[in-house]
Amino acid sequence: MTAHGILPSQAIGSLIETGGISASKPVLPGQVQPASLDLRLGARVYRVRASFMPGPVATTGEQIERFVLHTIDLSHGAVLETGCVYVAEIEEHLALPADVQGFANPKSSTGRLDVFTRMIADHAPGFDQTIPGYHGRLYLEICPQTFPILVRPGSRLSQIRFRGPFVQETKIAADQPREAVLSVDLSGGGPYPLIGYRAKRHTGVIDVDRVGAYEVEDFWEPLMVTPQKLLILDPDQFYILASKEAVRVPPTYAAEMEPFNALMGEFRVHYAGFFDPGFGMAETGGEGSRAVLEVRSHKVPFILEDGQAIGRLIYEPLTALPAQLYGQDIGSHYQAQALKLSKHFRER
């Protein structure tokens, strides 16, 4: 059985050069990350009745025709409302080799806005993945949960990574853990007793392409440490918290956090759970980087206590050392982070 791993940036670049990844507008250099590719919204987005999967016979386009309520032209930008389901065209097309498969996640900034996204590929076995050797279009389901968002062609809400075979035997460090359990930090350590943020409702619109444009207090309620060092999650409220542990992803690995684990509680802990190689490493300026947690409780109130296990991080090897690492002069917004909102908000 052929061993597979995550393709690094230079392998993604090769797919672009050979037509495995194509687009009507050239792929921009900044889209290629150490182990993933940012996906851009295309020209149109469709407001649909409900979420759907294409299935083994129908294509995504055919399902859109069945369930569309109206079509939105993104050329001048458009606001996507909370509580609605949209399916957007993706600019990038795939023509993957037979032994390469695509997997997607929301980008970190998307998850921290409580925007739920899932990539859809024709005849895929599930959301956020393609069949091996996939040839075809990609679409993105977009469901803003708390804040209405403004998007346009070229907006980047999701990222895709590729799993392929090892070209040659890659040495995997024997002492590198394959998984790690993360706990939540509700201690209020440091100069400020801040432990997290709870999203406000009925706010203004957030333009997903604007960086440092919005005041924190217009969209978020700060949460301070309590004597008991606990937090009660209200059902269907959205929280930004941080892990107690620092996360380190070695250069030849990528990592992904499980979004939901019923054994740890009835809550979702992460939307955008992908960590690029080099995240949190001292040599790339990330010593002490925490995992930011995007938390939403399901159905019932749930008590979190300081140090409680809240998520599991899974490590996967890359097929080769990437040409660039997270934090190395590539505009990484979340290296060396602690508790941090998305890039759209002004730093305090």
Image: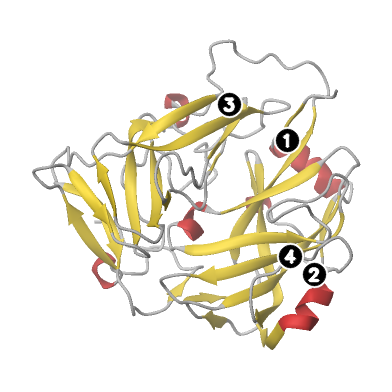
Seen in the picture, residue 74 relative to 283 is either above or below; the reply is: below
Q: Determine if residue 247 is in view.
A: no
Q: Are marks 3 and 2 in contact (CB under 8 Å)?
A: no
Residue type, label 3: Pro
Q: Nearer the viewer, mark 4 or mark 1?
A: 4
Report whether 59 appears left or right of 90.
right
Separation (CA) of disc 2 from disc 1: 26 Å
Which residue is situated farthest in the top direction here? 174
**Residue on which the image places disc 2:** 60
Q: Residue at x 50, y 80 (%)?
A: 81
Instruction: Say which residue appears at 65% left-offset and 71% top-offset.
Output: 51
> Dot 2: within a 10 Å radius of its alpha carbon, few (fewer than 14), some, or many (20 or more) residues?
many
Q: Are marks 4 and 2 in contact (CB under 8 Å)?
A: no
Mark toward the viewer: 3 or 2: 2
In this rendering, which labeled residue sits more in front, label 2 or label 1?
2
Counting residues from the start of the chain, the first of labels 4 and 1 encountered is 1
- Residue shown at the point (62%, 38%) measured from the top left: 34
Residue identifier under label 3: 251
Disc 4 target residue: 53
Discs 4/3, front: 4
Q: Is residue 265 above or below residue 154?
A: above
Mark 1 residue element: loop
Tell me the SS state at disc 3.
loop
